[in-house]
Image (tube, rainbow, N blue to C red):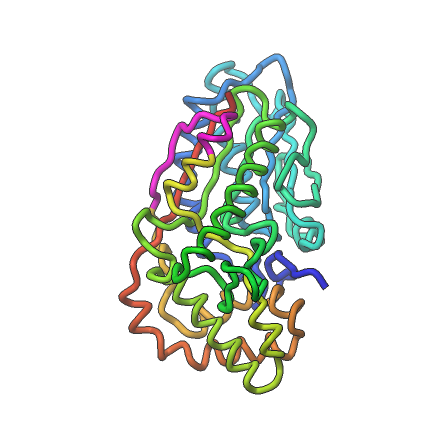
């Protein structure tokens, strides 16, 4: 069975929709920046009454609804200021929600804001490439999604490859492993930008938010890297208990790569479709995860539980998460001294 790269669906206590305040905090502090960007950088064609917005990697809500509403509010404010007309009467907003086909779109649509001022459509499928008609999109948005790769890099799971990685992720200990992950990131990020470059109208804006690693810092030195290593240790413990085959675990890796700042900028510049209008560090109250074992375990399950369950089964996933929380206090001092990651706000304008 192929790994599931989507967040936990539904509306229960262990769902992404109920456990994504960390991601929401970045959207809240980015609202002012997005509003200012739309006010100063976006050209609105007053001759057309349709305005298309897409959120790539939308998951299940409610964060995607906040992101979309921030954009609609800013566009409406700009339209009203420039035309002295009511945008409610003159603009038809169409919002396109994109994510993998196994995303829980049912929960997404069941929880749409009852007061929404836009038409909606789901666009299932990977965003690595074009998913919308050419020149159809005015504003694109993507938050906390670009660290996910389309696949585990080649050679990582091959025992005969110099890039073979016995750990579950690239945390910075092997140059060959790090290079393989970076190469895959360049391919995927390049495909993402190429697709958006074809979809966005000339002058359209693309907002990217999420986490990356400051230049000069290893993933293994950050809290997120340490938590991934902790998860790997717990998976190995579950293998020793017999719930996971050790050889299969040795070939298991997560398809994620939080890039360094310079790597992000390089791929954008090489793509050539966009002008970088902003690439900033942005801070919010929940910038680092709280040092709470229960919170960390739930966050881990929401984010990675689907991948682990699809590979090793539900019992192994549940046992792994049980150990993750139980042994979390052992690494709290290390987490407290971790180097800071970086939350980014990137604004690109289509050339």
Q: Residue at x 58, y 67 (%)?
A: 251
193 left or right of 95 in image: left
Q: Residue 262 sits in which quadrant? A: top left
Identify the residue shown where x is 49% and y is 65%.
299
Q: Residue at x 29, y 67 (%)?
A: 336
As drawn, the residue found furthest toward the bottom would be 241
Quarter of the rendering containing residue 11: bottom right
Q: Residue at x 50, y 18 (%)?
A: 43
Q: Quadrant of the N terminus?
A: bottom right
Residue situated in front as seen by the camera: 34 or 131:
131
Residue 87: x %, y % from top left:
57, 23
Q: Is residue 75 above or below residue 342?
A: above
| The one of 128 and 141 positioned closer to us in this rendering | 128
Image: 137 above or below 189: above
Specify start and end residues of the magenta stretch as a single range.
Answer: 268-282
**Percent from the top left, x then y, of residue 123?**
70, 41
State left or right for residue 52 relative to residue 293.
Answer: right
What is the quadrant of residue 245 in the picture? bottom right
């Amino acid at each position: 069975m192929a790994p599931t790269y989507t967040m936990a669906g539904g509306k229960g206590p262990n769902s992404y929709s109920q456990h994504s305040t960390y991601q929401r905090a970045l959207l809240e502090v980015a609202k002012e920046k997005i509003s200012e960007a739309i006010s100063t950088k976006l050209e609105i064609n007053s001759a057309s009454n349709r305005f298309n917005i897409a959120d790539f990697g939308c998951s299940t809500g409610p964060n995607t609804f906040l992101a979309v509403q921030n954009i609609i509010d800013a566009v409406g404010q700009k339209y009203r200021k420039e035309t002295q007309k009511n945008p409610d009467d003159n603009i038809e907003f169409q919002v396109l929600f994109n994510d993998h086909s196994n995303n829980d779109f049912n929960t997404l649509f069941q929880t749409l804001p009852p007061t929404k001022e836009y038409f909606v459509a789901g666009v299932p499928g990977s965003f690595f490439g074009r998913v919308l008609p050419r020149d159809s999109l005015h504003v694109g948005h993507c938050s906390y999604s670009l660290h996910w790769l389309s696949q585990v890099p080649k050679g990582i799971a091959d025992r005969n490859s110099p890039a073979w990685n016995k750990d579950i992720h690239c945390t910075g200990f092997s140059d060959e492993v790090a290079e393989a992950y970076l190469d895959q990131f360049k391919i995927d990020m390049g495909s993402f930008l190429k697709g958006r470059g074809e979809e966005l109208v000339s002058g359209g804006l693309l907002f990217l938010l999420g986490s990356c690693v400051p230049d000069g810092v290893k993933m293994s030195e950050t809290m997120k890297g340490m938590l991934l290593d902790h998860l790997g240790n717990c998976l190995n413990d579950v293998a020793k208990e017999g719930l996971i085959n050790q050889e299969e675990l040795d070939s298991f890796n997560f398809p994620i790569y939080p890039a360094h700042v310079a790597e992000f900028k390089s791929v954008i510049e090489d793509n050539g479709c966009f002008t970088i209008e902003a690439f900033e560090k942005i801070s919010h109250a929940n910038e680092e995860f709280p040092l709470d074992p229960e919170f960390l375990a739930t966050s881990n399950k929401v984010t990675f539980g689907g991948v682990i369950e699809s590979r090793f089964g539900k019992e192994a996933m549940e046992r792994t998460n049980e150990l993750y929380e139980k042994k979390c206090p052992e690494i709290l001092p290390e987490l407290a001294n971790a180097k800071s990651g970086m939350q980014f706000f990137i604004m690109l304008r289509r050339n």
